[in-house]
């Protein structure tokens, strides 16, 4: 999916909601456990219930990899089930020397047909470049994250600037706003205005709203640009809104509430 298509979907739905399918088998409602593939059945019902309110789904691959081959099969089926009208993100945080990243890119862009993958930039340009060589695919590079450990490196100064600033400015020169996004955590809302001045045109993937306490209103006010420029991810607050048989209806209700809040920014 290219940038023009993504922006059109956002404007059409008046939504920049990304739903994280961080499906923990231990939290799936018990009535689904007798299914042939409980994880996929859960995801399928969540997608059916929420697709009208979001523009993207993000699959955190760790929740699938932990189950081995069966987990990978659940993930593949889920990716195939997500409508082509929705932006599909592999939250895999890959990034390695060039020939290894080439294989990661092939796995997630060709074999599994994701639109985007999260990438760790620590090893430099040759570890990110392979993800930028695919047409209409995106590298979503870690910038300033929500976790406490962001203070260990990202918010340390290097030659007078924060390391995360160095990452944003350097990586933005490797790609373009057409194929590069950045992860900016919602709990870092105090930094959003400054970050938007550094990179006025890029999209940001913003996790941390919902269970982690990030403010959708603050982020929207400080970081939206002319094309919206945001994909705000909500995972647990939506997909685990209920642990009972009404889980999909509960998920739809929460997703609808987020979309309604987003509408006022258009």
Image: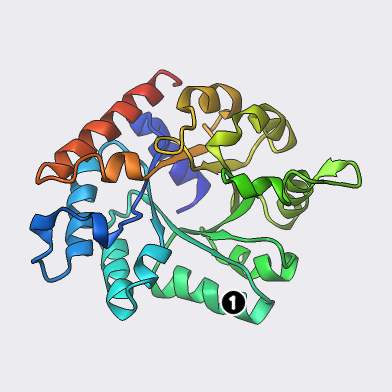
Nearest the eye: 243 or 88:
243
Nearest the eye: 25 or 134:
25
Secondary structure under tag 1 reads helix
Q: Residue at x 56, y 66 (%)?
A: 134
Q: Residue at x 26, y 68 (%)?
A: 77
Residue 64 on image: x %, y %: 35, 67
Residue 13 on image: x %, y %: 34, 32
Residue 196 sits in which quadrant?
top right
Q: Quadrant of the N terminus?
A: bottom left
Residue 261 on image: x %, y %: 37, 22
Residue, far right: 159
Question: Tell me, what colour scheme is on the image?
Answer: rainbow
Q: Is residue 229 left or right of residue 244?
A: right
Q: Is residue 86 left or right of residue 31?
A: right
Binning the other alpha carbons within 10 Å of mark 1 as few (below 14), some (14 to 19) or many (20 upward) gives: some
Q: Residue at x 32, y 63 (%)?
A: 79
Residue 237 on image: x %, y %: 33, 39
Nearest the eye: 45 or 22:
22
Residue 211 sits in which quadrant?
top left
Q: In this rendering, does residue 230 appear at all? A: yes
Residue, far top: 264
The residue at which mark 1 appears reads as 102
Above or below — where is 34 with respect to 231? below
Q: Residue at x 39, y 72 (%)?
A: 65
Q: Quadrant of the C terminus?
A: top left
């Amino acid at each position: 999916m290219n940038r023009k298509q993504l922006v059109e979907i956002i404007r059409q739905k008046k939504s920049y909601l990304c739903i994280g399918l961080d499906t923990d088998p231990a939290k799936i409602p018990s009535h689904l456990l007798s299914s042939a593939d409980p994880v996929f059945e859960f995801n399928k019902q969540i997608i059916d219930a929420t697709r009208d309110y979001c523009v993207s789904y993000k699959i955190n691959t760790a929740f699938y990899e932990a189950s081995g081959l069966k987990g990978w099969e659940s993930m593949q089926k889920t990716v195939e089930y997500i409508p082509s009208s929705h932006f599909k993100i592999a939250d895999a945080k890959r990034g390695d020397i060039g020939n290894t990243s080439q294989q990661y890119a092939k796995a997630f862009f060709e074999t599994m047909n994701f639109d985007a993958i999260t990438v760790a930039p620590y090893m430099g340009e040759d570890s990110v470049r392979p993800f930028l060589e695919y047409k209409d695919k995106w590298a979503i590079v870690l910038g300033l994250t929500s976790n406490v450990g962001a203070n260990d490196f990202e918010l340390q100064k290097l030659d007078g600037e924060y390391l995360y600033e160095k990452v944003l400015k350097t990586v933005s020169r490797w790609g373009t706003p057409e194929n590069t996004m950045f992860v900016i955590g919602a709990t870092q809302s105090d930094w959003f205005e400054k970050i938007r001045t550094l990179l006025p045109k890029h999209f940001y993937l913003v996790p941390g709203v919902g269970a982690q306490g990030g403010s959708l209103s603050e982020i929207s006010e400080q970081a939206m640009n002319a094309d919206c420029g945001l994909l705000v991810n909500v995972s647990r607050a939506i997909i685990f809104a209920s642990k009972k048989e009404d889980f999909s209806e509960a998920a739809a209700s929460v997703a609808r509430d987020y979309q309604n809040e987003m509408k006022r920014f258009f």
